[in-house]
Image (cartoon, helix red, strand yellow):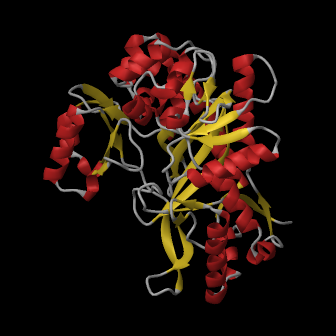
Amino acid sequence: MSRPDPVAAWHALLDEEGAADTLGWLVERQAHDGIAFGARPLCTVARPRFLSAAGYDALRRAARPLLGALARIGQAALADAELRAAFRLADWEESLLSRLPPVPVVTPFSRIDAFIDPVDGVPRLTEFNGETPAGAGYADALSDLFQALPVMHRFNRDWVVRTMPCRPQVLGVLLDGWHRFRGVRSRPTIAIVDWADVPTLSEFVLIRDYALRMGVPCRITTPEALSFDGTALRDADGTAIDLVYKRVLLHELVARGGLEHPLLQAVAAGAVAMLNPPQGKPLHKKASLAVLTDERHAARFTATQRTVIARHVPWTRVVEERHTELDGVTIDLIPWMQAHRDELVLKPNDDYGGNGIVLGWQVDDAAWHAAIVTALASPYVVQRRIRLPSEPFPSAGPDGRMALSDRIVDTAPFCWDGTYMDGMLTRISTDPLVNVTAGGGSTVPTFVVEPRT
């Protein structure tokens, strides 16, 4: 007997007119509620993403040992200069870390970016966002909208639909971080800090408004508005800030404000708590996956962690002149890369939005050679290509008519306290470089579903 298919069940409830009405309402409500990435609606399709309970549990089981392995090397890197060198930190990052004390959790709030292999069903981790993981507020807001759809009400007749709220987790991690920092359970004044012109401002509003509803003082401010008097970090109006929910990227903060920026001074002085802390910066580097998969570092992990890493993390190396192992065979890395571009992806060690990524199978030999030259001159990683899953989603075509079109599906679970996964961001795209920041894709909410019995 074939298993019930929630995707087919959802599509069966939508004719072309119903899909158009559903998408029209979703776009209208996103505009009304400020659920946008810059000026663009986040969601441009008329279906959420569905995961089975077994599929979701498989993700959670894989996440725990992976997070344990990441936490192990993240903590070790703070004390071990030789290991830290493997992450290819910039000089200013080394200088910043040298001024800061140890922290119990280097990445209290993170996001795994992965794809579930369409052939074997195994999720494979392609990046680890350990500095400013975005999307938790957006995931909740889109979940609320889709739950209000008439088609969802009809879908619920035959399917049990489970949501995965993320904003409570964000607030919980912030408050728990405050407790660890101060040793008290008082309510801190939280500031969400980023530049005024970032396209994710609407998500900051969603997080701030949720915190305020929960009775926690929270505001949105910018790096330029902050000052430090030696004892307290203050906003432009003089309000003392206890806890910073840092959304500004450290390299942008330092590029514009230097290492003596008031926020960094306050953190170094122990006058303010900041999540995520700068001590998590090594793990945010794409070289963290190279540390996980490189034979040079295998002895740092438990047998269980090594097994999970081999199953879920694609072979990744920092681009450099060296010999290394691949599938049990020693290779000369650079010549091997030049001969196998169809199997490889090049990524800058610390960038976002798809910037600088080169997909070997989409360029010719000359462009690939030039990309390798660039990668040798500046920290890059090379990663083995993985199979990408796709699903059909109802969307408006160029002629405005509704139709089903296949979209590549990215699975990006949120992780908490460096130990467990719960909730996720799902991004879909027609382009293999699935990234909303780069303008190529849509965000959809994810629901765990089971047939109703």
Residue 148 point in image, percent of width and height: 77, 70
Residue 83 found in image quarter: top left
Q: Quadrant of the C terminus?
A: bottom right
- 102 or 200, nearer to the observer: 200
Residue 337 spot, x, y in % from top left: 23, 40
Could you say which is closer to the camera, residue 61 or residue 155? Answer: 155
Where is residue 369 drawn, in percent x and y?
16, 45
Q: Residue at x 58, y 66 (%)?
A: 43
Tell me if 226 is positioned left or right of 328 in this view. Answer: right
Image coordinates for residue 181, horizontal then vertical, percent: 69, 19
Q: Residue furthest left?
A: 366
Q: Is residue 57 left or right of residue 396?
A: right
* Residue found at the far front of this picture: 237
Q: Quadrant of the N terminus?
A: bottom right
Q: Residue at x 51, y 25 (%)?
A: 262
In the shown orientation, is residue 347 left or right of residue 446?
left
Q: Is residue 247 visible?
A: yes
Q: Is residue 423 above or below residue 71?
A: below
Quarter residue 26 falls in: bottom right
- Location of residue 23 by image quarter: bottom right
Q: How many marks?
A: 0
Please, is residue 94 above or below residue 294 in the view? above
What's the residue at 65%, 31% (across, down)? 238
In this rendering, the answer to whether 10 lies above or below 162 is below
Question: Could you tell me which residue is drawn at 44 percent across and 33 percent down?
Answer: 253
Q: Is residue 327 visible?
A: no
